[in-house]
């Protein structure tokens, strides 16, 4: 619309007005471009940190080569600490793989010859050699990246702006058509009527609205950076105000992604300290196995100063085939065998298998612990002929210390939290209950076949793959929700990209950070609360700006068009209307810094209700405008040029007064505006008064008349404030006081 107006202004020889309008468009575009470009550069630096090397056999010898050079059929060797560079089928050796960033499973998986090690997994223990099956986009990692490429939702902010403009332009087109018909019937020169009609349209378009949204969100982004939140897409801040469902990954997001001993159950003849000591003897710190490290840490906490350890004569690390590890130690001249592993595997070695028979109490306890989401290990000790069960140890990936408090705070803000994880249902359900999410667990089968379950009946989705998380977010969006997503792994990236508010935690992979709109730079999830609260404060500021703009647009459009038809003269010149854009719209951008309070519920834009609320307030402003015009024309007998200057000053004063009128949903004196808003308003009043008093860009008027006009405007707005309180009470979107 504005671009078309620029062309028409040039055709009519109005180069000055065309230049000003073009400048407004450039300001809008530049603000957003600079901030988004800055965020893209930061993400590019993050991606450059990942430079994976692979041990590959080339030209008859082993060598380190960049992973990007691998091709199917290459022989690759993997060992402790490696990031698996491609999808590799293992030919020999045993590996323990951390696939949590890909699948969301918190516990490591064991891989033997014949198994596939997926690209992006981390080798936690062992060594193996294998053959490359797939690279790049053909790997499971690459398929997830392709989901990221195709994911993404539209901007609700853009929809809001278009909706506001649609209604305002519809009114203005009607008024312009009426004005042109009037000009044709009365013989008014079209060379005068047409430029005025075009300027009327320009004055009605919320030119500074996108720039003000961008400025408000950019200021919010700087505020969030101080609280450990990097904003990579400015629209996410605005979307977070309406956030009502948060889909959260479990591993590394709600939980620590670190294995801990959750419970120790010794059998008669043992205590917790002795059971942990036996289990520690069957661990090897050198392997850095997460389960072994958890048991060693628990044993040290139980008994910080251990007695002299027995001499270990042999050690067999965990073998996926036997599902156990074992050690032979010599203590006081006696050779002892210690075994730890899966309960059933350990029971088969014990002298009395009845200890863990299906009907035994210890078997019942093992099943109960497993059903609660724990990984259960059995420990046995003795000689080869007298090996007896010593007890059970339960392991878990526990929730972060701040997780339960965070969930509660989000729920108090009206945000429902759903957990989506690759772990089994029992584990996910147990964690969800502990942090206050709920206990209703669902499987993602319905999401895959298009028959999604009733989403309100599911607190947890377990055994999900990346495409399941993406479908869950899309299903929630289809139900009308504004969805947030938190995660840390590659498996979370597609859903992070699709969600309106995708949030990557501090330890997230580069892929997850690149897909997210917000990146937490501090450990934990608490900073997401800052994002929600900041976004809701921004909503309140933009509600003030939008409501003020609609009021002014209705007032100006009706006043200018009806003024011509009722009086036969232009109540203001096109040049003063363009100047009004600067003195009103761009000064009121200081609303982006205003002091406001956030709402305790999600905020949604209700454009029709905004228009219905603004209309009566605009009517009250219209009464003041026509009253001042007729007093100046018929009582003071001002010349038309002076009267036009006076009308310009009045429109500036009422525009600024409206800001302070509507920024507080109760009486205007019940909250204090920001310093920048006050200073910009005072500066605007002073600048306009000087321009009008000295006749710069307009015909001068007496200073006393400007002072009287300022006083009348202030008294009138004070009276309108009491009516405003009742009118704004209908605006449900502004339930929180501004």
Image: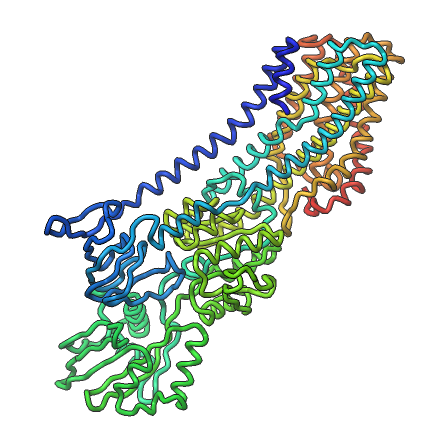
* Residue located 56% across and 27% down the image: 28
Q: Could you tell me how many numbered marks the image carries?
A: 0
Residue farthest along the left direction in this orientation? 60
In this rendering, position of residue 181 left or right of residue 239 = right
Does residue 311 sit above or below 87 in this rendering?
below
Quarter of the image containing the C terminus?
A: top right
Q: Give the quadrant of residue 354.
A: bottom left
Near-viewer residue (188 or 524): 188
Residue at 65% x, 46% y: name it: 604
* Foreground residue among 426 and 403: 426
Residue 583 in sight in this render: yes
The percent position of residue 201, horizontal first and vertical second, equals 70, 22
Q: Nearer the viewer, residue 439 or 295?
A: 439
The colour mode here is rainbow
Is 519 on the left-hand or right-hand side of 651?
left
Q: Residue at x 26, y 58 (%)?
A: 88
x and y percent of residue 340 in the render?
27, 78
448 relative position to 268: left or right? right
Instruction: From the viewer's perspective, tell me whether residue 438 is left or right of residue 82.
Output: right
Residue 400 in sight from this viewpoint: no
Residue 147 is situated, as x and y percent measured from the top left of the image, at 44, 50
Pick whichever, 14 or 725, lies toward us. Answer: 14
Residue for point 57% across, 55% down: 476
Name the quadrant containing residue 251.
bottom left
Picture quarter with the N terminus = top right
Against 440, residue 220 (above or below) is above
Q: Position of residue 649 (x, y in %)?
A: 73, 18
Residue that sits furthest to the right in the current view: 635
């Amino acid at each position: 619309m504005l671009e078309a107006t620029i062309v028409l202004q040039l055709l009519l020889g109005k180069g000055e007005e065309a230049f000003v309008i073009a400048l407004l468009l450039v300001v809008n575009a530049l603000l957003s471009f600079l901030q988004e470009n800055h965020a893209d550069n930061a993400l590019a630096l993050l991606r450059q940190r990942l430079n994976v090397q692979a041990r590959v056999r080339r030209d008859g010898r082993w060598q380190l080569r960049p992973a990007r050079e691998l091709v199917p059929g290459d022989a690759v060797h993997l060992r402790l600490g490696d990031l698996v560079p491609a999808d590799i089928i293992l030919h020999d050796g045993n590996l323990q793989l951390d696939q949590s960033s890909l699948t969301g499973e918190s516990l490591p998986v064991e891989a033997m010859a014949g198994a596939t090690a997926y690209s992006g997994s981390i080798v936690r223990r062992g060594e193996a050699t294998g053959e490359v099956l797939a690279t790049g986009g053909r790997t499971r990692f690459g398929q997830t990246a392709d989901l990221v490429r195709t994911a993404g939702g539209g901007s609700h902010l853009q929809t809001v702006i278009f909706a506001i403009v649609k209604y305002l332009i519809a009114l203005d087109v009607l008024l312009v058509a009426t004005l042109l018909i009037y000009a044709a019937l009365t013989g008014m020169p079209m060379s005068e009527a047409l430029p005025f009609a075009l300027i009327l349209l320009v004055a009605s378009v919320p030119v500074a609205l996108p720039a003000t949204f961008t400025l408000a969100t950019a200021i919010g982004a700087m505020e969030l950076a101080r609280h450990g939140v990097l904003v990579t897409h400015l629209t996410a801040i605005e979307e977070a105000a309406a956030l009502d469902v948060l889909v959260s990954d479990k591993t590394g997001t709600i939980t620590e992604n670190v294995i801990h001993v959750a419970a120790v159950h010794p059998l008669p003849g043992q205590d917790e300290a002795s059971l942990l000591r036996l289990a520690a003897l069957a661990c090897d710190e050198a392997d850095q196995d997460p389960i072994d490290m958890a048991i060693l840490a628990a044993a040290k906490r139980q008994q910080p100063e251990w007695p002299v350890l027995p001499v270990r004569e042999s050690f067999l690390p965990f073998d996926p085939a036997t599902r156990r590890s074992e050690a032979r130690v010599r203590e006081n001249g006696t050779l002892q065998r210690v075994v730890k592993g899966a309960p059933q595997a350990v029971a088969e070695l014990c002298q009395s298998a009845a200890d863990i028979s299906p009907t035994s109490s210890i078997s019942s306890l093992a099943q109960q612990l497993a059903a609660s989401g724990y990984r259960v290990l059995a420990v046995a000790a003795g000689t080869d002929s007298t090996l007896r069960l010593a007890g059970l140890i339960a392991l878990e990936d526990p929730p972060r210390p701040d997780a339960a408090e965070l969930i509660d705070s989000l729920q108090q803000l009206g945000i429902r939290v759903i957990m989506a994880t690759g772990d089994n249902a029992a584990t996910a359900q147990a964690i969800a209950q502990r942090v206050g999410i709920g206990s209703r667990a669902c499987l993602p089968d319905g999401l895959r076949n298009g028959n999604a379950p009733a989403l309100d009946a599911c607190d947890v989705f377990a055994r999900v793959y990346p495409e399941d998380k993406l479908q869950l977010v899309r299903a929630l969006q289809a139900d009308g929700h504004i969805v947030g997503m938190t995660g840390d792994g590659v498996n979370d990236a597609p859903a992070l990209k699709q969600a309106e508010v995708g949030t990557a935690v501090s330890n997230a992979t580069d892929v997850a950070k690149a897909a997210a709109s917000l990146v937490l730079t501090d450990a934990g999830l608490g900073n997401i609360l800052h994002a929600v609260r900041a976004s809701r404060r921004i909503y309140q500021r933009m509600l003030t700006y939008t409501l003020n703009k609609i009021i002014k647009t209705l007032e100006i459009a009706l006043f200018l068009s009806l003024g011509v038809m009722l009086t036969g003269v232009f109540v203001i010149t096109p040049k003063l209307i363009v100047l009004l854009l600067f003195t009103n719209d761009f000064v009121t951008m200081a609303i982006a810094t205003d002091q406001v309070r956030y709402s305790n519920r999600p905020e949604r834009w209700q454009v029709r209700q905004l228009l219905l609320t603004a209309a009566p307030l605009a009517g009250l402003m219209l009464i003041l405008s026509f009253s001042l015009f007729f007093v100046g024309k018929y009582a003071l007998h001002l010349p038309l040029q002076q009267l036009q200057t006076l009308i310009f000053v009045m429109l500036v004063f009422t525009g600024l007064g409206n800001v302070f009128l509507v920024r507080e949903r109760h009486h205007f004196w019940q909250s204090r505006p920001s310093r920048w808003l006050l200073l910009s308003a005072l500066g605007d009043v002073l600048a306009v008064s000087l321009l009008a008093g000295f006749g710069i860009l307009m015909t001068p008027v007496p200073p006393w008349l400007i002072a009287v006009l300022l006083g009348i405007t202030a008294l009138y707005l004070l009276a309108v404030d009491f009516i405003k309180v009742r009118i704004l009470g209908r605006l449900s979107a502004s339930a929180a006081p501004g």
